[in-house]
């Protein structure tokens, strides 16, 4: 029974292999780089248009950044000029730091990742753009971890301003410390991942 199952499984797997080139394949690649070159040659020869969804991605990023930035700016202006206390607390300064970190994150995403192939078919991206994409992706990993850590710390500091109990405040301060160490550890780990 086990042998029959394996034969059926192997036959099913063989049938599942599809020819995505529409029968217009030039040669079979040996590795990932030659696979990309092979796919590029095949698709160019067969005159298949390169899909490009990068414009939609950029529009989405800009909309989210403008809405989030507007909300944060509204909160900070309200706290500074309209509220009874008329000053920014630690949660506000931390979310402002997150906004500062988000600006290079958006810039690297648009001018690094999108400019070098994000949203396009891989076979339509040149090898030079793939290298630039990889470098931009490395930078965005570091910025993303920093940004998420600062946002988590900001939210925890906001909770500190809401809750007055001694036990819960200790828990929140421990959470701030955990997020700070977590962010530092992962940032160092990402920076030195290739060492």
Image: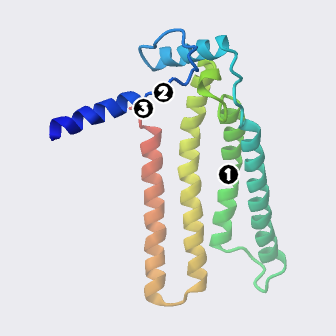
What is the residue that sits farthest to the bottom in this orientation?
Answer: 165
From the image, which quarter does the N terminus lie in? top left
Tell me residue 191's x, y (percent).
47, 39
User: Which mark is first along the chain, 1 or 2?
Assistant: 2
User: Which mark is first along the chain, 1 or 3?
Assistant: 3
Is residue 64 something that shows in the picture? yes
Residue with the mark numbered 2: 18
Q: Crowding near pointer 2: few (<14 within 10 Å), some, many (20+)?
A: few
* Residue at 59%, 54% in the rendered image: 147
Tell me residue 13's x, y (percent).
36, 32
Residue with the mark numbered 1: 102
* Residue at 54%, 43% in the rendered image: 141
Is residue 125 something that shows in the picture? no
Position of 178 with respect to 53 (left or right) is left
Pointer 3 with pointer 1, Cβ within 8 A = no
Q: Which label belongs to residue 179?
A: none
Label 2 to label 1: alpha-carbon separation: 42 Å
Looking at the image, which is closer to me, 35 or 115? Answer: 35
Q: How is the image coloured?
A: rainbow
* Residue at 48%, 76% in the rendered image: 172
Label 3 to label 1: alpha-carbon separation: 43 Å
Pointer 3 with pointer 2, Cβ within 8 A = yes
Looking at the image, which is closer to me, 114 or 184? Answer: 114
Q: Is residue 151 above or below residue 40?
A: below
Which label sits in the foreground, 3 or 1? 3
Residue with the mark numbered 3: 16
Say which element carries label 1: helix
């Amino acid at each position: 029974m086990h042998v029959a199952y394996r034969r059926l499984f192997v036959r099913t797997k063989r049938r599942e292999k599809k020819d995505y080139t529409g029968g217009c394949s030039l040669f079979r690649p040996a590795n990932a780089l030659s696979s990309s070159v092979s796919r590029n040659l095949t698709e160019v020869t067969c005159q298949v248009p390169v899909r490009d969804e990068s414009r939609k991605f950029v529009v989405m990023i800009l909309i989210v950044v403008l809405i989030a930035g507007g909300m944060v700016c509204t909160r900070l202006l309200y706290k500074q000029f309209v509220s009874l206390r008329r000053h920014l607390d630690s949660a506000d300064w931390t979310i402002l730091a997150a906004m500062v970190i988000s600006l290079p994150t958006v810039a690297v995403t648009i001018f690094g990742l999108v400019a070098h192939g994000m949203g396009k078919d891989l076979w339509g991206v040149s090898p030079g753009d793939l290298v630039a994409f990889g470098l931009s992706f490395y930078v965005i990993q570091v910025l993303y971890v920093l940004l998420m850590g600062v946002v988590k710390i900001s939210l925890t500091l906001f909770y500190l301003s809401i809750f007055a109990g001694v036990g819960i405040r200790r828990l929140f301060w421990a959470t701030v410390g955990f997020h700070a160490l977590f962010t530092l550890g992962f940032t160092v780990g990402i920076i030195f991942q290739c060492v």
